[in-house]
Amino acid sequence: MDMKIRAWPVVIMPSAWPGTLIFRHTYLGASSEMGINCVAEAGARLAAESNLMSGQVAHNIAEKVADGSKPTFKRQQSYTFKPKAGFAEVSSSLQRGIKEMRNFRTNERALDIRREFSKGHESYTVSKSIREHGAVAAKKNRLHELCMNLDDFERVARDVMDNGGFGYYMGGATDEWTLKENRSAFEKYRIIPRVLVPVTSVDMRCSFFGIDLRFPVMIAPSAMHGQAHEDGEKATARAAVRAGSAFTLSSLGSMSMEDVAGAVPTDHQGKPKGLIFQLYVFKRRDITEAIVKKAEALGYRALCLTVDAPITGRRERDLRSGFTVSDAMGQLPNIQMLGNVVNQQLVEFEAQKDLTLDWSIITWLKSICNLPVIAKGILHPADARCAIKAGAAAIVISNHGGRQLDSTPATIDVLPAIAAEVRGEIPIFLDGGIRRGTDVFKALGFGANAVMMARPAVFALAVGGEHGVSRMLRLLYDELECTFKLAGCKNISEVPSRMLSSVLAASSALNAV
Ligand SMILES: Cc1cc2nc3c(=O)[nH]c(=O)nc-3n(C[C@H](O)[C@H](O)[C@H](O)COP(=O)(O)O)c2cc1C
């Protein structure tokens, strides 16, 4: 029986190269990379398993298909073929590949297979690099679908961004010891589950300063989202608020407070939901005051006062790559009030920061507005106490993602001591290296009320714009919900009882049974 293949992404060509597989670009729309990998995997399998097939992979003319015009095949008869032994192989292999495309790691493996496979095959026509495919798919806002966890966004962002821009987001100060420590420290801690706890539904909701969160995760401030994606902070903020998270707009954001406020859903009073404004205090207090009042008038729910950056840390990646923030300084609308003083140069912006600040700045801020003030950048229990005394509404335990003073401890390591000092008097947020649902869980377990994260948001933005950030938050939500259920927790208050502070504690707990 002859078969006509139209929607099926593979055509077995009966003539010169009996095993050539042609990937119909239309099959997965823009997700060409996934499809190509699957086909490559199928082809590689065939090369190994079937004598009939040469296993070569050909790539259809993607642009033509994308245009909507009909792809031209050299051999039209290739649409028609007689089923033969090899087809079953292709079919089942491809089916497997398509299932597995939902797993990015598998796709990475398939990419390797493809590379190996291409060696020595002159007619191998899939010559585009992942970077090129990435760019095509990113333009179509589908590349984020490759990402199965937060680290995947970083990997893909590395491919779609230029080196300098990626290095700016990724980098930390000097040796980047703290940057690494923020991640590796989470590995020390253990979750010990309780079982046969009914977990049909778990409640991860919480609320701070009129911001209702579906789960205890917020986006920390990070500068210049416009470098990651043209939709910039508007896209990140909208995705965050829609996901039931919150967004902190940096003073160094690429988009204005007004634009971001206009981009997110509003509450029943017409006030934008889920927005916080991050503040640097300038020597020109009149300008600082004007910025604060603007944020309040626009409906931002809190000020996030960064207390760990009187000057900017030394970032050697940027020095090496030649990336300079000054290039973008002219497009930072939220500090335009500094006008000519800044003259679009980072060094001049830095010179405007007030280095005389002490804890009384919180009192001053509270005297000029009614917004709660969050002190961001606390690592010492004594500073947490100072923040409470000064009237801070919350603190963020943060080492600025390892970008300021290198050699500071991981934030998760200092959390228990700070939580013991704060004793629930004000909410504690934590940022630095949060990449997994289990990381969020561990932070909650040691006394944080919620966490923040920065890099995953900018990487997700670079990879897929608003859709990328939505997917990133959805993945983290799902991971956290899964962690709650597997740990036997129905709500946030039960989390601390599932935490053990070290491997030793875990083994002694088990020995004690
Ligand atoms: C590219 C980048 C820019 C940042 N810009 C700011 C900023 O403007 N203000 C601020 O308070 N923190 C800034 N941070 C620090 C973050 O708010 C946050 O403390 C830290 O990145 C959290 O670690 P994570 O990136 O591992 O989640 C920035 C971080 C990055 C990576």
Image (tube, helix red, strand yellow):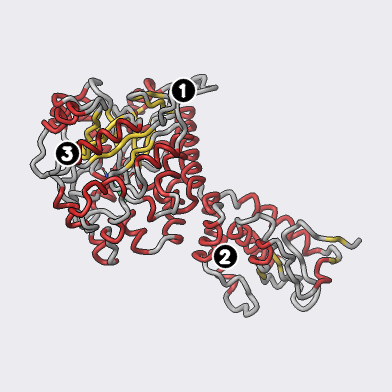
| Discs 1, 2 touching: Cβ within 8 Å | no
Q: Observer-nearest residue: 366 or 138? A: 366
Residue 486 lies left or right of residue 341; in this view the side is right
Residue 139 percent location from the top left of the image: 53, 57
Q: Is residue 201 above or below residue 333?
A: above
Location of the C terminus by quadrant is top left
Q: Which badge, 2 or 3, comes first in the chain's sequence? A: 2
The amino acid beneath tag 3 is Asp
The amino acid beneath tag 2 is Ile
Q: Which badge, 1 or 2, comes first in the chain's sequence? A: 2
Q: Observer-nearest residue: 332 or 112? A: 332
Q: Residues within 10 Å of mark 1 (few under 14, many from 20)?
A: few
Location of the N terminus by quadrant is bottom right
Q: Place residue 79 in its image quadrant.
A: bottom right
Residue 392 percent location from the top left of the image: 20, 27
Q: Residue at x 80, y 76 (%)?
A: 15
- Camera-nearest label, 2 or 3: 3
Cα separation, mark 1 vs mark 2, equals: 54 Å
What secondary structure is marked by label 3?
A: helix
Cα separation, mark 2 vs mark 3, equals: 61 Å
Q: Residues within 10 Å of mark 3 (few under 14, many from 20)?
A: few
The amino acid beneath tag 1 is His
What secondary structure is marked by label 1?
A: loop
Residue 411 lies left or right of residue 237; in this view the side is left
Query: Which residue is label 2 attached to?
Result: 113
Residue 479 percent location from the top left of the image: 47, 36
Which dot marks residue 268?
Answer: 1
- Camera-nearest label, 1 or 2: 1
Q: Place residue 189 in its image quadrant.
A: top left
